Amino acid sequence: MKILVCISKTPDTTAKIAFTDNNTKFAEAGVQFIINPYDEWYALVRAIELKEADPSSVIHLVTVGGADVEPVIRKALALGGDEAIRVNADASDSFVIASQIASVATGGGYDLILLGKETIDYNGSAIGAMVAELLNLPYIALATKVDVQGATVTVTREIEGGEEVAEVALPVAISCQKGVAEQRIPNMKGIMSARTKPLKVVEPVAVEALTAIHHFELPPAKAGVKLVSPDNAGELVRLLHEEAKVI
């Protein structure tokens, strides 16, 4: 089985968020970037598990971005990817990103395309569906379990009040979330081997962006904590009613 895992970089969850250029660009200076957790912990690790079950499988990684993405994609190689492809394009528009991934996948003969359900910076959840549409593949989102038997994939996903189990024939694109796999840490052998694994850089296909960022805005600062004495229930009720407005 040939698996393509889509990898994106995101700011570390502890990064301080700031903007530049009149609040139209994220200020990347000094920010530590990581593999988007949904891509790493679930999509990539599940691909690795499938390869462990079937050692003839091959895992390719694809990412869209400049050279600054390469440390992130190298970590993904250290975890267990066999080779990586970086599309040398600005990753600022979902349609452009999806089109670049679809271009890489076209003709690649991939049986399974795995993605995280979303990135933790933009939370758009748009790429997976777009990639599937561009490749004319079936798409299942928000998978919590992915099992492959022969040419059939059984996918479990959460729905309101329960679970849905679906079967689909390969090839297919699936977005993954918590439950599909468990996070792994690269070992020294993986880190060393990642240095020599192929990382191919390809130029982007010509695609027009469908969206443009007007400006970013930080949410209002959280109010401080108010402490209420245990013997002052009346004040607690007043605060909940007049300030928090929850009763």
Image: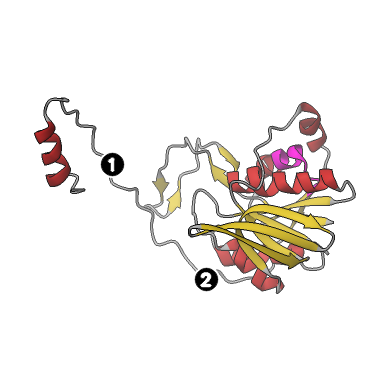
Instruction: Pick whichever, 217 or 135, lies toward us.
Output: 135
Q: Picture coordinates of residue 35 (x, y %)?
A: 62, 43
**Residue projecting furthest to the bottom:** 136
Question: Which residue sits at x=79%, y=33%?
Answer: 190
Q: CA distance from mark 1 to mark 2?
A: 32 Å
Q: Is residue 36 visible?
A: no
- Residue that protrudes farthest toward the front in the picture: 162
Q: Is residue 238 magenta?
A: no
Relative image position of residue 106 (x, y in whole percent):
77, 68
Classed neighbour count for the residue bearing mark 2: other residues with Cα under 10 Å, few (<14), some (14–19), many (≥20): few
* In the foreground, 148 or 11: 148
83 and 247: which is toward the camera = 247
- The boundaries of the magenta stretch are 74-83
The residue sitting at 13% across, 39% down in the picture is: 237
Residue under pointer 1: 221
Mark 2 highlights which residue? 210
